Amino acid sequence: MKQAIVARTDIGMGQGKLAAQVAHASLSAYEKADDQLRSQWKQGGQKKVVLKGESERQLHELSAIADSEGIPNAVVRDAGHTQLEPGTVTTLAVGPAADDRVDAVTGELSLF
Amino acid sequence: MKQAIVARTDIGMGQGKLAAQVAHASLSAYEKADDQLRSQWKQGGQKKVVLKGESERQLHELSAIADSEGIPNAVVRDAGHTQLEPGTVTTLAVGPAADDRVDAVTGELSLF
């Protein structure tokens, strides 16, 4: 079980901003998962990987693939109080789900 | 309502590692909050700030203060598969709670 969080590298987020947006996506996708997925993932130490995304379009495409596979996922838009324009898409979380199911969506991406 | 996540700056986490550990702390503290705090925080856009911590000791001290104030909080230890020694304390999340209650614990720290 794992969760992959894809963060855009093309919008110049600082480290703290990046971390907050990753956390936002992680929690939002977690809330969409059913109880069994949630508890299995937490029992395994809530494994997470943070991956490099290249564009807003890519995040939406990966989200659509996850939707079609029935994998919980969430795209985050920043409120835009700091650093970014309001509504900027920043991150996508895929899972928690079985490792191979998550890899089928995000397996081509590099670790952040 | 907000949540503050304090991350250690003295252990050399890479950006992706930092983000994953911040997300881990965020979710763990969120799970300790009651339903009312959770829903209020989410309605406000799950506001988060990521702050600089200087040592394991500091994180434990801030956690103890949050405990004494009755504020949900969670200290995260890394599983140690990459970058860090197993069991290394990496992050502390404080809240969700009212802004002034969180600030009473972490208000002296700098933004990451």
Image (spheres, coloured by chain):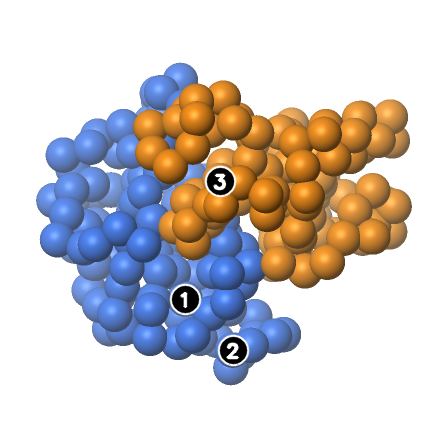
Chain colours: A blue, B orange
Q: Where does the image place residue A51, in percent across and percent down from the top left?
A: 29, 53
Q: Name the residue at 51% across, 78% down.
A: A84
| Residue A89 in sight from this viewpoint | yes
Q: Name the residue at 50% across, 67% down.
A: A14
Note whether A18 is above or below B87 in the view shown: below
Residues under numbered marks 2 and 1 in contact, where contact means CB atoms less than 8 Å apart:
yes
Other residues around mark 1 within 10 Å, as few (<14) / some (14–19) / many (≥20)? many
Label 3 – label 1 distance at C-alpha = 18 Å
Q: Where does the image place residue A34, in percent across and percent down from the top left?
A: 37, 31
Quadrant of image for the C terminus of chain A: bottom left
Other residues around mark 2 within 10 Å, as few (<14) / some (14–19) / many (≥20)? some
Q: The disc numbered 1 marks a residue on which chain? A: A
Q: Name the residue at 49% across, 21% down.
A: B87
According to the image, label 3 marks what residue? B21
According to the image, label 2 marks what residue? A84
Tell me the amino acid under the disc marked 2. Answer: Leu
Tell me the amino acid under the disc marked 1. Answer: Thr
Q: The disc numbered 2 marks a residue on which chain? A: A
Quadrant of image for the N terminus of chain A: top left
Q: Where does the image place residue A2, in percent across and percent down from the top left?
A: 29, 33
Q: Which mark is residue A90?
A: 1
Q: Which mark is residue B101?
A: none
Of the two numbered discs 3 and 1 in the rendering, the one whose residue sits closer to the viewer:
3
Label 3 – label 2 distance at C-alpha = 23 Å
Tell me the amino acid under the disc marked 3. Answer: Gln
